[in-house]
Image (tube, helix red, strand yellow):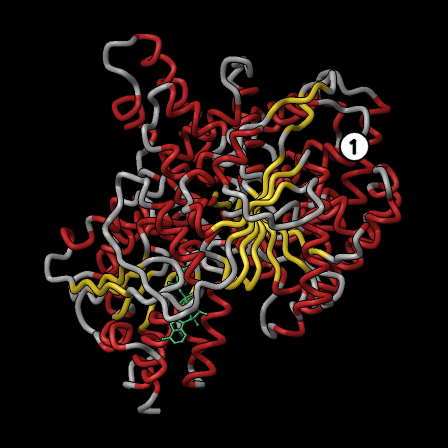
């Protein structure tokens, strides 16, 4: 055991051995930051620190699982399950669940995702009689969400966001402020949190209750954060609050990889760590273990075009390796076929496995062509983070029944069921029912008992509502009382409401959807088996938080297709970056923001993202773009300009191919070729 840290190089070791005080590990991609953090945790446990006294924050759930497994390998402590290891969201949820009453929530409290939140805003706008054209729900939700992320409360909204000298803007924010407070009230009434609440409410809880704060400060004696460059203001606040007074805080990150600025992440947090913690020790890791020298040199040269960088060195003992293969294709179809052929070639002749390969794109829609082609080349693939299993329509529908089962206050779920199940009663009547309930101080389900009381509801409509009340609502309330294992309960509910007949049969492709429903019920059974003592409530919460979870039908070898954002922290022997084109990568939005003077650094964030994408590769990196693509309804071709990032790579590290030429890597210099287009 004493040799534990021998798996680290001298600098990594220094970091992993520094257990007290503030430590910043600042280093480029692939230098072993995550590895150092993992070994440090094992070291803490080895030194006798109880896992429950360690708080470790990762950026994704997958990263948390990987880390837990690795620590288990290294030290195998029996108490490892007590370790607080997870994303900000999951850690905060845990704290909130231990203190529900203090944050005005009660048992059964669930989480609303962005779609749910926007639906709530939509209802409020409707109720306030505002025009959706002027107050677009999504836009309003974005403002509320930003405010919550920045810990701005409704009464502060005008002061914080409205321009002082502009009456129009004052008026606008006055209304938003009213919507925001109503939104908060609805969430409380429905006994739900939204995603932003998880962090905001935790901070409020801790700031308002000094005893509770002291308890957690005392519990989390050692705090560690991975991917610190992507921490936003409220997450930063939370970490500093919990770390006091000892400030045993260990953060690792890479300012070159800050890619969540659009979500409020602020790389100045990492840049100013030494300022916030003047005693901090900074460790720079310079040796890269992941990638070939060509990949490291090229990605470093790219990122040095940014102005805001901390200076970092990077070296490797690895060979130059293969050049970076850059390919220009005639159009996206040719590009997709090129990628498929290359993959088959690597598998057939170079011993690579399909799971060694990741295809990265800037946005999901870009990978459509590829998703069509992969099966034609018999390459099984897994789309990571796309429309996930839990986002499928039939599953989302069914989850509403389950939500009501655990949280009868969830009016949004109730309304959704009503909309799905009750035919012939539109929005206006639904809001009349709501109004009636409010005015007579009744529950909305009480009104369902004899709906003709409400203006505009005749006998036919009333019959539909009463049938819904009996079959769906009563079944849910009856089942709430029954002591059944969760999966049995769900299955029972499925049958009692006759989901197949009443819902699936109304949708397109019911047979296929039925298969997914079966998989869903199976997943519940698995969860139950693997998590004894946990129930439906945990199942629903966990699936909300785990956005990177997906159920795959089998475990065969698969190529992964994902966005550069979701590839963060991961590594693959072979990486393809597709669509390296102006207006795609860098994204059009960043170019517009920069041109409009809204964000002078917008393109720099895109460059960091391109750096993240390149540095996922260990051995082989392929970058491709198309000459032209179809645009507009008329099917005209649009000429494409290759991404500026390609021109920033060192020519001598590249191998340029034009896909039409049969020869493959022609070795012609990049710049000349690109100019021919
Ligand atoms: P990123 O910035 O992309 O998150 P990172 O700095 O966190 O990268 P890791 O993922 O920790 O880097 O490490 C990259 C690879 O290098 C991993 O496969 C890791 O196991 C390996 N590695 C790191 N340090 C060492 C070491 N001292 N000895 C052997 N392998 C190492
Ligand atoms: Mg990492």
Residue 625 shown left or right of residue 247 in the figure = right
Would residue 98 be seen by someone viewing this image from the given angle? no
The answer to which of 25 and 107 lies nearer the viewer is 25
Q: How many marks?
A: 1
The answer to which of 231 and 116 lies nearer the viewer is 231
Residue 265 shown left or right of residue 460 in the figure = left
The answer to which of 9 and 150 lies nearer the viewer is 9
Would residue 565 be seen by someone viewing this image from the given angle? yes
- The 10 Å Cα crowd at callout 1, few under 14, some 14 to 19, many 20 or more, is many
Residue 212, position in %: x, y? 27, 60
Residue 225 shown left or right of residue 579 in the figure = left
Residue 294 shown left or right of residue 540 in the figure = left
**Residue under numbered circle 1:** 422
Q: Residue at coordinates 23% horizontally, 14% vertically from top-left?
A: 164
Q: Residue at coordinates 35% horizontally, 86% vertically from top-left?
A: 4
Does mark 1's beta carbon lie closer than 8 Å to ligand 2? no
Residue 483, position in %: x, y? 69, 67
Q: Examine the rendered structure and indicate whether residue 261 appears above or below residue 438.
A: below
Residue 226, position in %: x, y? 36, 60
Q: Residue at coordinates 35% horizontally, 91% vertically from top-left?
A: 1
Instruction: Tell me the quarter of the picture where residue 400 sits.
Output: top right
Q: Secondary structure at mark 1?
A: loop
Quarter containing the C terminus: top right
Which residue in the rendered view is the most extreme toward the top?
167
Q: Examine the rendered structure and indicate whether residue 413 appears above or below residue 59.
A: above
Which residue in the rendered view is the most extreme toward the left?
278
Residue 366, position in %: x, y? 63, 38
State ligand 1's quadrant.
bottom left
Instruction: Tell me the quarter of the picture where residue 348 sits.
Output: bottom right
């Amino acid at each position: 055991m004493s040799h534990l840290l021998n798996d680290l190089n001298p600098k990594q070791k220094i970091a992993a051995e520094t257990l007290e005080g503030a430590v910043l590990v600042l280093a480029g991609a692939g230098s072993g930051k995550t590895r150092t953090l993992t070994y440090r945790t094992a070291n803490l446990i080895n030194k006798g620190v109880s896992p429950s006294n360690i708080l470790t924050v990762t950026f994704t759930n997958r990263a948390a699982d990987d880390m837990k497994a690795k620590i288990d390998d290294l030290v195998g402590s029996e108490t490892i399950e007590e370790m607080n290891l997870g994303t900000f969201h999951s850690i905060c949820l845990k704290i909130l669940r231990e203190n529900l009453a203090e944050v005005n929530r009660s048992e059964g409290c669930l989480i609303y995702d962005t779609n749910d939140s926007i639906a709530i805003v939509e209802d409020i706008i409707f109720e306030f009689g505002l025009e959706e054209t002027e107050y677009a729900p999504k836009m309003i939700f974005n403002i509320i969400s930003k405010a919550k992320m920045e810990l701005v409360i409704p009464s502060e909204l005008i002061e914080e966001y409205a321009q002082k000298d502009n009456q129009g803007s004052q008026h606008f924010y006055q209304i938003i402020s009213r919507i925001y407070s109503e939104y908060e009230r609805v969430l409380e009434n429905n006994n739900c949190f939204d995603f932003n609440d998880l962090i905001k409410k935790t901070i409020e809880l801790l700031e308002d209750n000094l005893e509770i704060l002291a308890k957690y400060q005392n519990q989390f004696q050692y705090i560690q954060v991975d991917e610190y460059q992507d921490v936003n203001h409220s997450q930063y606040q939370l970490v500093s609050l919990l770390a006091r007074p000892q400030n045993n805080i260990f953060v690792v990150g890479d300012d070159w990889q800050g890619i969540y600025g659009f979500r409020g992440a602020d790389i100045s947090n990492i840049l100013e760590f030494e300022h916030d913690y003047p005693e901090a020790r900074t460790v720079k890791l310079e040796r890269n273990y992941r990638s070939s020298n060509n990949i490291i040199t090229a990605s470093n040269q790219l990122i040095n075009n940014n102005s805001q960088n901390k200076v970092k060195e990077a070296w490797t003992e690895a060979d130059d390796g293969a050049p970076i293969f850059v390919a220009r294709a005639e159009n996206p179809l040719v590009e997709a076929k090129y990628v498929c052929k290359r993959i088959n070639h690597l598998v057939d002749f170079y011993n690579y496995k399909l799971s060694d390969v990741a295809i990265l794109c800037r946005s999901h829609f870009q990978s459509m062509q590829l998703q069509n082609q992969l099966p034609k080349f018999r390459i099984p693939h897994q789309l990571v983070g796309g429309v996930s299993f839990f986002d499928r329509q039939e599953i989302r529908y069914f989850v509403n029944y389950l939500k009501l089962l655990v949280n009868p206050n969830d009016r949004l779920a109730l309304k959704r069921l009503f909309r799905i199940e009750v035919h012939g009663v539109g929005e206006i009547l639904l809001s009349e029912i709501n109004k009636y309930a409010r005015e007579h101080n009744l529950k909305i389900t009480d009104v369902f008992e004899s709906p003709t009381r409400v203006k505009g509801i005749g006998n036919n409509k009333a019959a539909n509502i009463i049938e819904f009340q009996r079959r769906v609502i009563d079944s849910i309330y009856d089942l709430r009382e029954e002591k059944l294992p969760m999966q049995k309960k769900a299955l029972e509910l499925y049958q009692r409401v006759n989901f197949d007949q009443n819902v699936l049969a109304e949708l397109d492709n019911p047979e296929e959807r039925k298969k997914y429903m079966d998989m869903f019920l199976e997943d519940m059974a698995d969860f139950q088996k693997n998590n004894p003592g946990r129930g439906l409530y945990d199942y629903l919460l966990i699936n909300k938080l785990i956005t990177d979870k997906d159920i795959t039908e089998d475990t065969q070898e698969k190529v992964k297709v994902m966005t550069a954002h979701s590839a963060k922290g991961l590594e693959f022997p072979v990486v393809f970056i597709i669509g390296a084109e102006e207006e795609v990568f860098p994204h059009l939005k960043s170019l517009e923001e920069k041109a409009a003077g809204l964000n002078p650094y917008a393109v720099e964030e895109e460059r960091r993202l391109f750096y993240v994408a390149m540095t996922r590769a260990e051995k082989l990196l392929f970058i491709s773009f198309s000459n032209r693509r179809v645009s507009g309804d008329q099917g005209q071709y649009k000429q494409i300009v290759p991404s500026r990032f390609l021109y920033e790579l060192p020519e001598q590290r590249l191998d340029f191919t034009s896909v039409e030429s049969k020869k493959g890597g022609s070795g012609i210099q990049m710049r000349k070729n690109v100019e021919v287009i």
